[in-house]
Image (cartoon, rainbow, N blue to C red):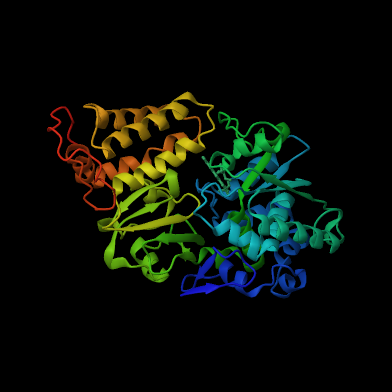
Amino acid sequence: MATEIPGLSPQIHILRGGEQRLLTDIGRVDPTSLDSYRGLGGYDGLERAIAKLGPEATIAEIESAQLRGRGGAGYPTAAKWRAARSADDERKVVVANLMGADPSALGDRALAEGNPHLVLEGLLIAAFAVGASEAYVAVRRDWTLAIQRLRAAIADAEAAHLAGYLMLGTDVSVQIALWEGSGALVAGEETALLSALWGDRGMPLIRPPYPTETGFQRSPTVVQNGETLAHAAWILAHSAEAFASVGSDASKGTKLVTIFGRVAEPGLIEVPLGIPLMQLLSTAGGGIGITKALFVGGSGGGAIEAGELDTPYDFEPMQAAGAVIGLGSILVTDADVCMVDTARFFVDHSAREACGKAVPCRIGTRRLVEALDRILAATPRPDDFSLLRDLSRKMRDTALCHLEARAPGPMLTTLEHFPDEYRAHAERGVCLAGSCDTATLPPLLAPLSGVEPVA
Ligand SMILES: Cc1cc2nc3c(=O)[nH]c(=O)nc-3n(C[C@H](O)[C@H](O)[C@H](O)COP(=O)(O)O)c2cc1C
């Protein structure tokens, strides 16, 4: 059941039925009122960290909760905090990543609009744990309501001495600044984000060194996804055990997932990590019976076919299946959706969003799109299928960032699972899904003896 939450952007629908911890508060808390947030236990976690635990025990709490980053990589949050804390430099920085690189994933935006203090509290806890007195909220510029809410929340938290100078009557001070960045796929990659924050072009850097060693203005920096920070605040308020009581062996807690496409009701749901995809869909009320494939993880993800819906929605199982969790989006398709055309859509998105720094990415993504266009137009070159595979491998092997390494994913996975759709388009100009306009194509091409069978 989708619920309209008053005061959120109209495109954000909350689906009920999942685990509902962060989302419940999105519906319950008044995002414009600090009192409302405090009334639900808000800033108790920060208070506990500062007044009771201290930095080391705060990190230990996050470690025992086994919190993994929700920005895509699933990296252990405590390890990052510890690395930055133990760096020699006096100045440390923390950054909330609300760049929303995947525009179809609405979790971070819903949090920023619906419960901005929760993200800020997580950021303040991170800053305290790391020993940073500087914090940035990097948010994509077109999330205007989120920006408005976050700005007001920062001002209210400062006025209440929960942020800023001498917080909660202690000698802990954390200044928060909000920074608006251009919304682009690569802009959310942490090294590109830090470059842009510094006033440079938003392009990724070679890692290592990692930002926890050399980050913003060369100071050790923790970049953390907005949802990760929200979970951190929840953990400090409710305990590591409560958090770790849901989720899988490898990944504890919940994840905000945006489901759209051929579903009865598109929207945002919070589910335990490790939930089988089939169960995730039924919890969200998706049309399981007619599902053909799920595109999991946006343009850096991949297609998971209907027969694999028992796969757990978790970092490693998704990767093993050729997809990624990414920022938590799932596109549901049915029999009437062309897999070649959908793959082309995603690869084209990556090509358009590529920053241009790495040549194999800039040129490679474009060449993939051109080959897919030839296949879709029934005018393939004899080596187009081997080009798709060889080029993908080279891009993965030479990648500067994951945009490049992962861009071929939607194409490679559909090629693997739906080779007949590629062949029918390439050899006969026929869309097996019936969704592409093939009326203008040559009626029947001579058999392409040179086209390699799909592996
Ligand atoms: C192309 C690309 C785009 C990304 N976009 C985002 C983003 O919009 N938001 C985000 O939190 N992480 C994004 N990431 C991941 C970040 O680089 C980084 O891993 C993350 O912010 C770390 O936070 P976490 O440990 O809490 O996940 C992106 C990564 C890549 C390769």
Q: Residue 6, percent across and down? A: 62, 72
Q: Residue at x 14, y 38 (%)?
A: 444
Q: How many marks?
A: 0
| Residue drawn at x 65%, y 52% as measured from the top left | 59
Quarter placement of the C terminus: top left
Res. 87 visible in picture: no
What residue is shown at x 33% (from left), y 64% (from top)?
Answer: 278
From the top left corner, tell me how far across and down residue 386 is, in percent.
26, 29
Query: Depth check: 348 or 114 in front?
Result: 348
Quadrant location, ligand no. 1:
top right
Q: Quadrant of residue 285?
A: bottom left
Answer with left or right where residue 110 lies relative to residue 381: right
Seen as rendered, the residue at the extreme top is: 359
Classify residue 305 by image quadrant: bottom left
Q: x and y percent of residue 96 in the render?
A: 66, 49
For image coordinates 45% across by 29% down, the residue present is 361
